[in-house]
Image (spheres, coloured by chain):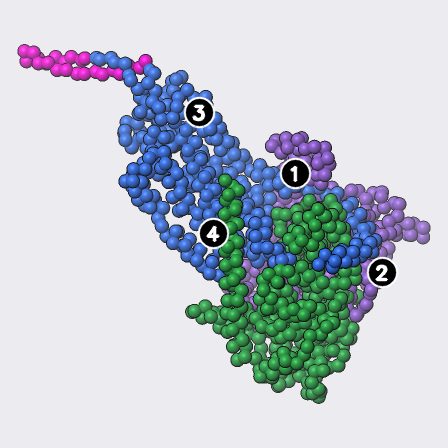
Chain colours: A purple, B green, C blue
Amino acid sequence: MLFKKKENNLPAGEKKKNVHYLTGKETREIAKSNNRRIRELEKKKRMHVSEADYTTTMRDDNNIVEFDDLHTHFFTDAGVVKAVDGVSFDIPKGATVGVVGESGCGKSVTSLSLMRLVQGPMGQIVGGSIRFNFGDGKAYDIAKMPMSDMRKIRGEKIAMIFQEPMTSLNPVFKIGYQMDEMVLLHTPNCTKDQAKARSIEMLQLVGIAAPERVYGCYPHELSGGMRQRVMIAIALSCNPKLIVADEPTTALDVTIQAQILDLLREIKAKIDGSVMLITHDLGVIAEMADYVVVMYAGRVIECGTTEEIFDNPLHPYTIGLQHSKPVVNRKVDRLYNIPGQVPNPINMPDFCYFKDRCDRCVGKCSGEYPAFVQVSPTHKVACYLYEEKTNSEE
Amino acid sequence: MAKKKTITAEEVETVASEAVAEMVEPAVEAAVAAPVEETATKTVEEAEETAVTEVKESEPLDPEAILEVRNLKKYFPVQTDFFGRPTKYLKAVDDVSFKIKRGTTLGIVGESGCGKTTLGRTILRLQPATGGEIYFDGLDINTLKTKELNKLRPSMQIIFQDPYSSLSPRMPIGEIIGEAVAEHKLVPKSELKEYVLDIMKKCGLPHHYYERYPHEFSGGQRQRICIATALALQPKFVVCDEPVSALDVSIQAQIINLLKDLQEDMGLTYIFISHDLSVVEHISDYVGVMYLGSMVEYATTADIFDHPMHPYTEALFSAVPVPDPKVKMHRIILSGDIPSPINAPSGCKFHTRCSRCMDICKEVAPKFKDYGNGHMVACHLYSQDDETPAE
Amino acid sequence: MNETEKLENENISSAEETVNETAGTEAVEEVSIADSVRALSPTRLVIKRFFRSKLSIIGLIMIIGLFLFSFIGPIFSPYQEGVADYSTDRMNVVTTKMEYVVDGETYVCYKVEKTPMAVDRKAPVSWEHWLGTDGDGMDVLTQTMYGGRISLTISFIVVILEMLIGVILGGLAGYFGGWVDTLIMRIVDIFSCLPDLPIMLIIGAVLDGMKIPARDRIYYMMVFITLLGWIGVARLVRGQILSLREQEFMVSATARGLSTKRKIFRHLIPNVMPHLIVTMTLGLGGVILMESTLSYLNLGVPKPYAAWGSMISAVDKDSSILQYYFNVWGPPGICIVLAVLGFNFIGDGLRDAFDPKSRK
C-alpha cells in the first residue's frame, strides 16, 4: 500500500525509467502464485508414498541413472526461475559423464535434484523423473521418493563431492569422527573399530601417506588438496555406485587439480562405478569424461561422446565455448567471444534461449524452442541449423 | 541541528586523520622496517646479501620501463612476543625484482599462497612494503609522502578478482565510476556525467545502467564496471588481480578482449596476475612465475612456454588440462602440497617437491640469473655449468 | 597541466571511435536479454522483505498507534498535564461510628457527613474520566498520553545521541586502528565496567541534593543514559568498520586516491547504516525500559510531569491502589509493554529486511 502511492506520484518520465523494476502489484501477484504452488508441492512431499509408487523400470538396464524431462524450479520474489527445465540424459554404468555449462545453467541443480538436496521451500522438483538403478533389477524414481527413503540412496548408493573442500567438512570434529559417522550410519552392525579400520583404509585408498595421522586431525590442519582427498574418501566409504562430483577441482591449484583428477580416475576404475562430473572447465571434461552433456539456461543443448563434442561440436554455444577459452601453446590473436551474458532464467521466452547471443541465427530460431536432432546414435543437438540438414538428407 | 553535528564530526575526523597520518606514516614504517631488516640479514644467505647491494649501487633506472621493482619484500608478522615485537614472519613477497616496459603486459602466475596478490598490492602501496624499492615513472613509491602518493594514485590502478566485493553495495554505478574522477578533478564538474557515460560506453555498459546499483548485475558486468571505475582515472598502469577467475568462460573471453582493446587504445601497461596459465599466455608479453613469495622464472611469453627452465614451471605448465580428448599429456605430477610460507624450506624453496633436487638445493638458495635473452631463472640446475654473471 | 589533460582527453575520444565499433554492438545486444529480467529496486527490496513478516507489521502499527496516542491525543483531551480535576460533583462521604454507654447498655450511632469533594480523587472509570483519576485527582488517560510524549521523546533523543557518539568514536577506532583504536577501546572498556543502575541511583541522589528543578531533570537524565549507553554502538561500529575495511571496495577506494573523508562518509557509514538502524530500533525499547525504571524509583521525571514509570510508582505510595485501582497503574504498564514489544518487532523485521542472506 505504502509504495503504491509513491509510484502514482511519480511523473510520467520517471516512471518510464524505472521499467526495469517490478511494481508492487506485480510482486504481490508473484508472491501469491508462488505461495500457492509451494504449498501444493510441499503437501505432496509430505504425503506417504509406498515403495510400489516410486518403483519404475529403467529404459536401459545398462544405465545407472536416467534423467527424464526433469523440471526443477525456484520460486523467487522476482518470478519463477526455471533452473532445470526439461533435462534428459543418461549416465551409463561405469562411465564418466561430464556436465558442462556456465554458472546458472542448472548443472548443479540437476545434481542436487538427483540427491534431493534442492533447498525447499523455494526450490522444488516440479516434474519429470530421475530413474535410479538400485540393483537386483529394481529401479526407483528419485523424484517421487519420500525424503525418509532417500537415506537408502544418499551416501550409500550415490555419494557427492562438493566444490568447496574448505566448507564441506565440519570444522569442530576430527576427520576420523566424520568418516566413522558415515560408515556407522550406513553399515548395519558395524562396530567402532571396524568403522575406524574402514576409514583408514579409505584414506589410504585416496593416496594419503599417513592415514593414521590424518585420521586424528581437524579439518583446518589440512590443506585444500588434502581436504578434497578426505572428501573423496568419505564419499567412497560406502562403496557408492555413482559419485557426483560438483566442480571438485575448481577451488584447487592446477598442480593439486592434476593430483585429484588422477585420483578420481584411479578410483573410478577401482570401485567400478560411474562418475557424474560437473564442471565449467572444458579441459577437465576432455580429460576425464566419456560422455559430455552441455547445458545452457536450464536445458541440455547438446550431448554426445567426448570425441563427438570436441571434434565435431554442433551447437553454436558449444562451439563458442570451446573457442572462447585460450589454450596453452595455441596462439590466437583475438579470442572468440560470445556476446551478451548468461541469461537469468526468469520468464524465459519460448524460443531458443541462445538466440540473442547466437551469430548463426536463422529465421526459424524465432519460432518455438528447437527439439533435439539426432546426429549420430549418441550425439544429439537442439538447434534448427541441423534439423534442416537431416531433413534434406532424408 | 543535524548540520551542526556533521560539521563537528568532520572536524573531529579531519583533525584526527591528520594527527594519525603524521603519527602513523613515519612511525609505522620505521617500526616495521627496522626489526625486519635485522632479522632479514640474519636469515637471508650471504650470497643474496651481496647481490642486493650490487643492484642498489650500480644499476640506473631503465628509461623504457614504466615500473621497476627491486628486491621488493613484504613480510607479515604472524607471531609476536610479549612486548608485541614480531618474532615470526610470513614472507609473502621475498626479494622480488623485475621491470615492465611501457605498453606491455607482464603476466604473473603461481599457485594460491605464492604471494602474487600481495605483490600486486604492495607495488601500488596499498600495503607498505617491508623492504626494497618500487620505481614508477622514476619515483620511488615507497618513500613518497601520502599527499604525493594520492596525486599519483590515478595513474596506477587495480582491478580485483571478486567483482562482488569490489563495488560499494550502496552506491549507484554512475557515482562509483565518477567519484574518484571528481575527487582528482580530472574533468570539470559540468562534464562529469558525460565523461562517465563515455567511459561506460567504452567498457560496453549501456547508459541506462548509470543509476542502478551493483547488486543488480551479473559478475561479468560488475567486472566491466570495475574496469570502467579504474579506467575513468586515465591510468598508465593497471594491476589486474585475477580479473577473470570468478567469471564464466564466455564472459572471460569478453573481459580479456575488452582489456586488450583498452590496452591498445589507451597505451596501458598491465600486470596480469592469474593462476590460469592459458589466459596469461594469451594476454601477456612477459611472464613471471612465482613460488612461495619468490620469483623463480621470468621470460618472454613465447620463451617461457616453449622452453620452461625451472622444474616448477615445467610441472605447472604440464598440469594444465587441455580441452582436447586426443591430446594425452605426459604430465609431471608434483608430490605433496605447497609448504606454508611461514616456515618456507631452506635453500631453494621448491626442493621439497622437486624431482631433480640436488644436495646443494637444500642448503643454498639459487640466484635469480639471466640465461640469455632476458630469460631469468633461479635454479641450481643451470648455474653449475654456466657461471656468467647477469648482464 | 590543462594541456596534457586535453591531450589525453583527445586521445581517449579518438580511441573511443575504434572501440565503439566493437563494444557498441555488444552493448546493444546486452540490453536485450539481461534487461528482460526485471528486478526489485533496492528500497523496494527492503520494504518488501520488511512487510513480509507479520510481526513487523504488528510492531509498526503498535508504534504508530502509540505515537498518535501520545502526540495527537492530548489535543482532544479536556484535561491538562499535572493538573488535578477540581470540577466534580462527587461527594466525600465520611462515616463516623460512635458508641455510647447508657445504663450499662451500649448504643452504636453512625454519623454520616457529606461534603463536596475538592479534588476528584481515585475516580472510577466513567464518561468524564475514561480511565478514572489517580490518587491526586489527575486524569489517567491524559497523564498516560503526556507520559508517552516524554518516554518516546527521551528514547529517541537518547538513541540518536548514542548513535552520534558511537559512530564517531567507533568509526575513528575502526578506521584508524593503532593507538587511536587502543585509546578509544580502553575508554569503552572503562565505561562498560560501570554498573548502570547503581550509578543512576547515585546520580539521582546527587541531583536531588543539588536541588535541580524538576523541569531540567529530564535533560540530565538523557545525558547520563546516553553516557552509559554509547559503548555498545561504538563497539558495533568499530567491528563493522574493521570488517568493511578489508573489503575490496575499500582497497579500491584507497587505490583510487579518495580522501579519508569521502571513504568514511560515502563508503563506510552507508554500509554500517543498516546494522545501526537495527541496533538503534532495538535500543529504543531498552531506553524506554531504563527511563521507566528510573522514574519508578523516583529518580527520573518527577511529579507533576507524567512519565509511564512514575505513574506506576503510585502503587508504592498507596497500597490500596495496587489492590483496587487497576485503572491507575495498568494503562501506563501496558503502554510500556507495547512500546518495547513494538520497537523489538520492528527491529527484528528490519534486520531480516536489510540482511540479504536472511532466510528468503
Q: Earlier in the sequence, mark 1 or mark 2?
A: 1
Chain at tag 2: A
Seen at 44% across and 56% down, the residue is: C185
- CA separation in Å, label 1 and label 2: 42 Å
- Rendered image quadrant of residue C313: top left
Q: Are marks 1 and 2 on the same chain?
A: yes
Q: Residues within 10 Å of mark 3 (few under 14, many from 20)?
A: many
Q: Nearer the viewer, mark 3 or mark 4?
A: 4
Looking at the picture, which amino acid does disc 4 mark? Leu
Q: Which residue is mark 4?
A: C169
Q: Residues within 10 Å of mark 1 (few under 14, many from 20)?
A: some
Looking at the picture, which amino acid does disc 1 mark? Asn
Residue A34: image tag: 1
Looking at the picture, which amino acid does disc 3 mark? Pro
Q: Residues within 10 Å of mark 2 (few under 14, many from 20)?
A: few
Seen at 30% across and 27% down, the residue is: C321
Q: Are marks 2 and 3 on the same chain?
A: no
SS assignment for the magenta stretch, majority: strand
**Picture layout, residue A305 above or below residue C116:** below
The N terminus of chain C: image quadrant: bottom right
Residue A312: image tag: 2
- CA separation in Å, label 4 and label 1: 46 Å
**Picture layout, residue C80 above or below residue A89:** above
- Element type at marker 2? loop
- CA separation in Å, label 2 and label 3: 83 Å
C-beta proximity under 8 Å, tags 1 and 2: no
Seen from the viewer's position, the closer of residues B73 and C44 is B73
Residue C252: image tag: none
Residue C106 within the magenta-colored segment of the rendering:
yes
- Element type at marker 3? helix
Seen at 66% across and 51% down, the residue is: B182
